[in-house]
Image (spheres, helix red, strand yellow):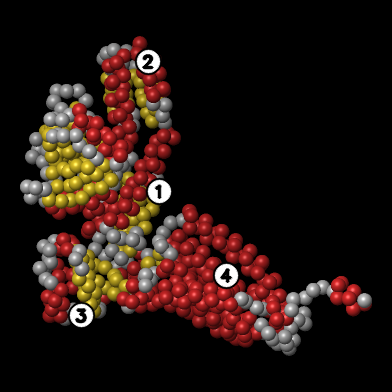
């Protein structure tokens, strides 16, 4: 009975066989994770080769064999040549010969601008075929071009004012108000001159139909202006829409690592890593071309405007377009029956409805296609150029799919189709700053950054090995595994870009990763000093250190998330590697280290162990 009583009242202890034990599936997950991340990080180890991309539109007079022979004759070493239907890629063995090779091949091209400098992964094809790719490098590491664009909001305000002015004229006509004069003022303002007897009706009309416009008395006139809050909303919406359009245009160019961000109130910053030949990108990014379709009217009719055609002859069209470029969802260049270039256009549902309704009521009448673009003159002022590119008679009801002709050469048709497909700007943009960073500067940044990483990693490995002796090698293996996981994640996550501040985050990650092991090992030392066996000290050390490690990493992760959310460019690069480093250091410091220690020392119940 006494023995039974003692067994019932004594605390239940875990059997020693269950101490420091991991199930087999945990080891399988650990090994698979390390293997996959190692394969993901491997292409980055091979680096990138200098290459020249030759589009099929370049009209190169040399075939693949002739390209190789021409380069060999000029002592330019060729690594390999990948010839495809739409593009030929010339990969060079010496990066220093990239520019010379492009200049040489450009002599045999009809359109030299279709030859672009590029960097291509140097990893074996079998590794790339598995879906792995090198880490995407930022502008400061890979080189490239940076644009700063100014979004002019004034035309948006003026368009709002023009729409209100047309509505006011229609209202005055219906109400029989005579001698009304509407004069546009600065930006969005309108000055109305009208009889005193009509002012109350006009005020009521504006307040009920256009509540975002403020009406004030200005002497004998009425002054209409947009509310300040509405101007701010219009500005934010316009810049945001232009941001989305810019991303679409850059995606159409095939540049996947681009960074497009808002800077200040009305500026957009674009970084194109790896683009060493910015001519094509500049043409597409800086362009503000769009189309609009107008009803052709009599010159003496009301609510009309005159737009010159390509011969300089004025064409009278309606003031408001039938459909604008914002309704275009697809545009493809082609060749018509008569051998002339054309653009096949597809409208969205709303645009198709408007075009169908208009053409149904105007069969046999003329419709003009107007091309518009913005630019800055020598004085820096914004100018708009409108041009009628075609006037055609509507033969039948037009659906949401139709074609336009008179767009110039096939190359001009291709360019116009690209711009329309990528979206028309809601406000004109102009490039106010352009910077080109060469790949040599990026290579120097990479060398210096990773030299600092290697130095910090080496000193940390040496310290852990000397200070913690038998547990130090476990921490070193976990630290190396942490770097493999981190590089693998950076290469695997879509949109992750490594920048120079990101390398600083990698160096910081080394300290954070080893800090996890330091906390655990110190707890194990404390438990050994209490007289516990080595196996029990390991079990209690990991358990007691977990909450401290989690709290420290969680609070740092909050900082990393905030930095990534509100920062831009270099700040985001640092925050990204910091956040990923926190995740990988937790995984390797706690899970991987525990797995190794369980196998090596988990059954050691000696009390004479010193760490």
Circle nearer the N terminus (4, 3) = 3
Label 4 vs label 3: CA separation?
A: 47 Å
Q: Which residue corresponds to mark 1?
A: 264
Q: Are marks 3 and 1 in contact (CB under 8 Å)?
A: no
Under circle 3, the secondary element is loop
Where's residue 272, x and y in %?
32, 60
Residue 528 as seen in the image, left or right of residue 317: right
- At horizontal 66% and vertical 74% (from top left) the residue drawn is 542
Mark 1 nearby-residue class (10 Å; few <14, some 14–19, many ≥20): few
- Between disc 4 and disc 3, the foreground one is 4
Say whether disc 2 or disc 1 marks the residue closer to the N-terminus.
2
User: Residue visible at 74% across and 76% down?
Assistant: 14
Rendering coords of residue 174 (x, y %): 29, 15
Q: Earlier in the sequence, mark 3 or mark 1?
A: 3
For mark 3, what is the residue? 77
First in residue order: circle 2 vs circle 3: 3
Q: Which residue is mark 4?
A: 586
- Please indicate, yes or no, whether residue 573 appears anywhere in the rendered image: yes
Alpha carbons under labels 2 and 1: distance apart: 41 Å
Q: Nearer the viewer, residue 205 or 359?
A: 359
Q: Is residue 316 visible?
A: no
Q: Of the numbered discs in the image, which one, if any, rests on residue 201?
A: 2
Q: Residues within 10 Å of mark 3 (few under 14, many from 20)?
A: some
Residue 493: percent from left, percent from top: 43, 64
**Contact check, label 2 and label 3, Cβ < 8 Å:** no
> Could you tell me residue 97's position as x and y percent?
22, 75
Disc 4 vs disc 2: which is toward the camera? Answer: 4
Alpha carbon of mark 4 to alpha carbon of mark 1: how far?
37 Å
Apparent side of residue 430 relative to residue 315 in the rendered image (left or right): right
């Amino acid at each position: 009975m006494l023995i039974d009583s003692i067994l019932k009242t004594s605390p239940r202890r875990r059997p020693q066989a269950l101490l420091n034990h991991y199930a087999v599936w945990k080891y399988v997950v650990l090994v698979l994770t390390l293997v996959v991340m190692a394969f993901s990080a491997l292409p980055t180890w091979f680096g990138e080769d200098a290459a020249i991309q030759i589009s099929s539109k370049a009209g190169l007079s040399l075939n693949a064999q002739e390209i190789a022979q021409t380069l060999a004759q000029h002592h330019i070493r060729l690594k390999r040549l990948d010839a495809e239907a739409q593009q030929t890629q010339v990969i060079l063995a010496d990066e220093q010969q990239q520019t010379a090779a492009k200049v040489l091949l450009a002599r045999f091209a009809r359109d030299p601008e279709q030859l672009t400098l590029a960097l291509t992964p140097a990893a074996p094809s079998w590794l790339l075929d598995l879906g792995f790719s090198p880490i995407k490098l930022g502008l400061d590491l890979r080189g490239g071009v940076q644009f700063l664009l100014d979004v002019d909001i004034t035309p948006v305000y003026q368009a709002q004012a023009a729409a209100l002015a047309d509505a006011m004229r229609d209202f005055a006509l219906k109400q029989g108000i005579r001698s009304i004069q509407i004069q546009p003022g600065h930006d969005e303002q309108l000055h109305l001159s009208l009889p005193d007897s009509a002012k109350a009706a006009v005020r009521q009309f504006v307040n009920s139909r256009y509540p975002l416009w403020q009406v004030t008395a200005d002497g004998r006139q009425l002054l209409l202006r947009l509310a300040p809050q509405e101007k701010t909303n219009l500005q934010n919406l316009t810049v945001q829409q232009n941001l989305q359009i810019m991303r679409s245009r850059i995606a159409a160019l095939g540049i996947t690592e681009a960074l497009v961000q808002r800077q200040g109130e009305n500026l957009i910053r674009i970084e194109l890593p790896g683009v060493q030949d910015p001519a094509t990108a500049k043409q597409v990014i800086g362009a503000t071309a769009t189309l609009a379709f107008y009803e052709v009217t009599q010159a003496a009719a009301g609510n009309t405007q005159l737009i010159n055609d390509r011969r300089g002859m004025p064409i009278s069209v309606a003031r408001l377009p039938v459909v604008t470029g914002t309704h275009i969802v697809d545009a493809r260049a082609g060749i018509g029956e008569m051998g002339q270039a054309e653009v096949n256009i597809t409208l969205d549902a709303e645009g198709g409805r408007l075009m169908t309704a208009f053409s149904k009521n105007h069969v046999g009448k003329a419709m003009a296609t107007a091309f518009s673009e913005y630019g800055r003159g020598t004085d820096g002022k914004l100018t708009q150029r409108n041009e009628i590119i075609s006037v055609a008679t509507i033969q039948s009801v037009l659906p949401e799919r139709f074609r336009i002709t008179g767009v110039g050469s096939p190359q001009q048709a291709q360019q116009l189709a690209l711009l329309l497909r990528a979206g028309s700007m809601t406000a004109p943009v102009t490039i106010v700053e352009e910077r080109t960073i060469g790949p040599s500067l990026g290579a120097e940044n990479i060398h210096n950054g990773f030299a600092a990483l290697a130095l910090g990693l080496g000193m940390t490995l040496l310290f852990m090995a000397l200070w913690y002796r038998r547990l130090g090698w476990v921490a070193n293996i976990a630290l190396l595994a942490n770097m493999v996981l981190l590089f693998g994640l950076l290469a695997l996550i879509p949109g992750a870009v490594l920048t120079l501040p990101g390398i600083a985050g990698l160096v910081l990650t080394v300290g954070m990763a080893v800090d996890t092991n330091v906390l655990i090992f110190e707890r194990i030392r404390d438990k050994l000093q209490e007289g516990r066996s080595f196996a029990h000290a390991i079990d209690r050390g990991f358990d007691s250190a977990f909450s401290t490690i989690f709290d420290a990493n969680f609070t740092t992760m909050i900082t990393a998330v905030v930095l990534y959310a509100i920062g831009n460019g270099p700040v985001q690069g640092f925050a990204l590697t910091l956040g990923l480093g926190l995740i990988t250091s937790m995984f390797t410091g706690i899970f991987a280290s525990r797995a190794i220690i369980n196998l090596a020392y988990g059954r050691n119940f000696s009390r004479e162990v010193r760490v």
